[in-house]
Amino acid sequence: ATAVRTDLSGKGVNVSVALAGIGAESVLMGFCAGPSGEVLVQGLSAQGYACDFVPLASGETRSNITVLDEATGVTTKLNEPGPQVYERDMQAFADRLEQMLAPGDICTLSGSLPPGAPVDSYARLIRIAHRKGALAALDTSGAALRAGCEAAPDWLKPNDVEAASLIGIPVESLRDPSDLAEAVEAILRLGPQRVLLSLGPRGALYADGQANPSGHVDLWWARPPEIDEVSNVGAGDASLAGALYAWQQGESPRDVVRWAVASGTAAAQEDGSSMATRARIESVYEQVSVISI
């Protein structure tokens, strides 16, 4: 290794850090366990983030390793399983979330479920958010993603691999605009109200779920400028943060997806899981093109 860095990170953490870079406030929630959990929460708090984590009685907050091969551009991720959670832990988190949420809040649910969590855990939390008059955005994969769709999240942010798996098609088929449109409409039929489909270097597609006179949904495809990528770790989280920020500001669907791609592209130019400043995002935003399909 020629260089090593340690980031306080994680899917939900990345979204909050990206929002802070844009200029939006949020509260970080999750589980913490052992000395690593203390380092995570205390470090984030010291950086000025509002934290409300549920401590676990045993285990250790996981450390994930990302290896960036500068010669080939290949990124290899080694993700630990994380600490075991039990029903009492899930209930404690659900209760904490319900107390935290207020009408109009946006609750972002990100990442894989911890070991021991029921597959419908995100669906349960989405229903709590809706009961409190809040909105829910879901970014996960596999069985948790499918179960979460049944609770009709207000936002869903799969990447192309996760989307293909969700609707049972080969990821290679997500190439042509017509195929992408069909895939997004198939995802919407599973329950989510809006879909932000990230396509890596090809940008992202956004559908707000509203059918046009032809009976199909309007779909917007934003494409990024060419960049020298430094690290794509957290780029998808930054995209979600940018989209949610723009949407909350009342921007049009075209500008929502443009903000998403600008935020993700700007993050990919940062080292590790660092997030871009608003000035960098706005600079990239001017170079993002958007088409309707």
Image (cartoon, helix red, strand yellow):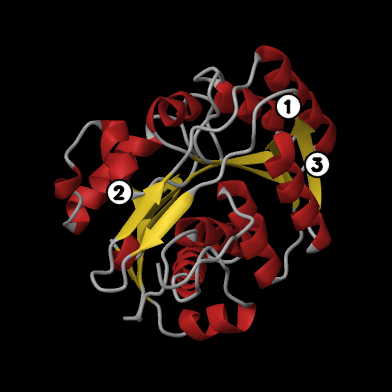
Residue at 62 percent across and 30 percent down: it is 126
Is the residue 105 above or below the residue 128 in the image?
below
Tell me which numbered mark, 3 or 2, is placed earlier along the sequence: 3
Most foreground residue, 128 or 236: 236
* C-alpha separation, residue under disc 3 versus residue under disc 2: 32 Å
Residue designated by label 1: 56
Q: Can residue 212 be seen in this view?
A: no
Residue designated by label 2: 160
Marks 3, 2: nearer the viewer: 3
* C-alpha separation, residue under disc 3 versus residue under disc 1: 13 Å
Q: Residues within 10 Å of mark 3 (few under 14, many from 20)?
A: some
Residue 173 pos. (x, y %): 15, 47
Task: Describe the element under mark 3 as helix, strand or loop.
Answer: strand
Marks 3, 1: nearer the viewer: 1
Q: Do labels 2 and 1 touch, CB within 8 Å? A: no
**Disc marking residue 195:** none
Tell me which numbered mark, 2 or 1, is placed earlier along the sequence: 1
| In the displayed structure image, the side of residue 208 where residue 181 appears, left or right | left
Amino acid of disc 3: Asp
Tell me the quarter of the image containing the N terminus: bottom left
| In the displayed structure image, the side of residue 60 where residue 186 appears, left or right | left
Residue designated by label 3: 52
Amino acid of disc 2: Asp
Q: Residues within 10 Å of mark 1 (few under 14, many from 20)?
A: some
Q: How crowded is mark 2: few (under 14 residues within 10 Å), some or many (20 or more)?
A: many
